[in-house]
């Protein structure tokens, strides 16, 4: 495969970093962009990655030392239109992989400022890219990370982006009807519309990867050295469900399921994320084409996922229980779900399915970093879809401060109760 010049936007994040390493290792010339805003949001929320992550300059220097390969690191905010334009004009990329968004649904549901900030950050950043591509690199391939959450949970099969509809005797291939479940998911759908429009009117080329929930922390490249680690989020704002279950299991706590637990979603291993992005990169969309790949490998209900963790622990003679919590989200708790995900398989994806070994390796990771677990983060969620909530409900500890001791029970630290959203507060877009 010919070497490509690829810009990875959001390179300091969970998926951006692992993808940048994977593409660099595959011989591509990688430029990594990030505003580091996620590290700021962590400080604001009092959250942190379970696995310590190095600074970007440290990470790229280590990568260079280990492999001789260069990732060109540039701090930059995608909402800075001039900087985005200069970047595209100067680098003349073959492709851009866009991970650089606020990606937490609970964060977007806290209150008006957080909803506004999420949508401004995500939609404006993507618009800046689209205009820069129109003017300075119209041949470049935009690979955008969308989410399966754009579809919602319709009572019909979910297709890959488009649906052929017959109406009053006429037929057309139309965008699949979307029912996103949070202001974050809505921002992704707004992006999808803008990207599709730009392909149609300016002839840009784009792949919208409607990704499921990602789990795992080890790709071949990340595993080369602890200093190359990528994030592991487990708290109520940023954490994903399997990570939370694994931490709860490691601490001998009940696995907490929101509502009935029949909520079904697509999931994939991080090794498959990086492989999917590479497949999209190396098989680009045609000029003017907007295509959607549903990027996940298996679908599970939340309850079935909890049962997998319980079974993996039982294989070692460890008993784990399950507890249902009132659901802070507004979503169907029992529903039909059958989403197609054929296109990446057709391009050659070889999935890594979720098995006991992966669950055990996540639990081992948790145990290795047990002193960094903040048990307060495993309590009731502090953002409710109907009433809003709060993220910064306690002072954020500095990275170097000792974290609370784990394996304590019961949890002694009090939580500040949910406060209702304040409609008088003005939105403060960045
Ligand atoms: N993690 C998942 O399970 C998952 C699932 C589906 C889709 N996605 C999508 O994949 C993408 C990456 O997710 P992640 O889990 O790696 O998130 P993350 O929060 O770990 O990383 C996102 C990175 O983008 C950066 N960023 C945000 N806004 C920026 C801006 N305006 N300018 C420059 N940098 C900015 C942040 O600083 C952060 O480093 C997101 O777009 C997300 O919606 C993730």
Image (cartoon, rainbow, N blue to C red):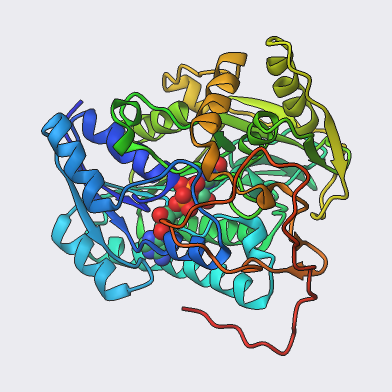
Relative image position of residue 187 (x, y in whole percent): 58, 62
Instruction: Please tell me in which quadrant of the rendered image residue 316 appears.
Output: top right
- Give the mark count: 0
In the image, 393 versus 148, the foreground residue is: 393
Q: Is residue 4 above or below residue 11?
A: above
x 70%, y 46%: residue: 378
Q: Is residue 87 visible?
A: yes
Q: Residue at x 80, y 68 (%)?
A: 417
Towards the viewer: 418 or 397? 397
- 121 left or right, relative to 159: left
Kindly give the residue lying farthest to the left in the view shown.
68
Q: Position of residue 200 (x, y in %)?
A: 44, 56
**Which one is nearer the viewer's eye here, 131 or 90?**
90
Task: Identify the residue at image location x=25%, y=71%.
Answer: 83
Specify whether 252 is left or right of 189. right
> Where on the picture, by quarter, is residue 422?
bottom right
Query: Is residue 145 something one can see in this rendering?
Result: no
Q: Position of residue 334 (x, y in %)?
A: 87, 37
What is the quadrant of the N terminus in the image?
top left
Residue 146 vertical placement versus 389 (above, below): above
Q: Quadrant of residue 69?
A: top left
- Position in image of residue 208 (x %, y %): 48, 45
Left or right: residue 202 versus residue 107 is left
> What residue sits 68% from the left and 52% below the top?
376
The answer to whether 406 is drawn above or below residue 346 in the figure is below
């Amino acid at each position: 495969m010919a070497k490509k010049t690829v810009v990875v936007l959001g390179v300091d994040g969970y998926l951006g970093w692992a993808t940048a390493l994977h593409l660099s290792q595959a011989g591509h010339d990688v430029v990594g962009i990030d505003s580091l805003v996620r590290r700021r949001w962590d400080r604001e929320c009092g959250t942190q990655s379970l696995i310590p992550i190095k600074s970007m300059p440290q990470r790229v220097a280590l990568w260079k030392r280990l492999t001789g390969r260069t990732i060109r690191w540039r701090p930059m905010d995608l909402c800075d239109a001039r900087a985005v334009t200069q970047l595209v004009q100067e680098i003349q990329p073959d492709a851009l992989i866009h991970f650089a968004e606020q990606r937490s649904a609970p964060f977007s549901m806290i209150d008006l400022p957080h909803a506004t900030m999420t949508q401004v950050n995500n939609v404006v950043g993507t618009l800046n890219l689209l205009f820069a591509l129109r003017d300075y690199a119209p041949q470049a391939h935009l690979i955008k990370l969308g989410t399966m959450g754009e579809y919602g949970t319709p009572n019909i099969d979910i297709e890959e982006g488009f649906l052929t509809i017959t109406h009053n005797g006429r037929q057309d291939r139309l965008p699949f009807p979307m029912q996103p479940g949070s202001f974050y998911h809505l921002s992704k759908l707004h992006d999808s519309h803008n990207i599709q429009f730009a392909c149609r009117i300016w002839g840009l080329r784009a792949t919208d990867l409607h990704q499921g929930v990602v789990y795992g922390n080890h790709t071949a490249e990340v595993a080369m050295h602890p200093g190359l680690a990528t994030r592991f989020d487990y708290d109520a704002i940023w954490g994903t469900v399997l990570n939370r279950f694994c931490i709860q299991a490691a601490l001998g706590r009940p696995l907490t399921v929101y509502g009935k637990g029949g909520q079904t979603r697509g999931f994939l291993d991080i090794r498959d994320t990086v492989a999917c992005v590479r497949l999209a990169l190396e098989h680009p969309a045609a000029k003017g084409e907007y295509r959607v790949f549903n990027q996940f490998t298996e679908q599970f209900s939340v309850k079935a996922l909890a049962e997998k963790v319980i079974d993996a622990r039982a294989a070692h003679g460890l008993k784990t229980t399950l507890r249902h919590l009132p659901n802070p989200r507004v979503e169907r708790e029992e529903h039909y779900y059958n989403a197609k995900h054929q296109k990446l398989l057709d391009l050659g994806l070889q999935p890594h399915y979720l098995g006991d070994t992966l669950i055990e390796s996540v639990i081992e990771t948790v145990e290795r970093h047990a002193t960094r677990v903040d048990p307060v983060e495993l309590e009731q969620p502090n953002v409710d879809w109907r009433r809003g909530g709060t993220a910064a409900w306690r002072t954020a500890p500095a990275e170097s401060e000792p974290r609370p001791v784990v394996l304590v029970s019961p949890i002694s630290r009090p939580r500040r109760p949910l406060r209702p959203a304040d409609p008088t507060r003005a939105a403060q877009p960045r």
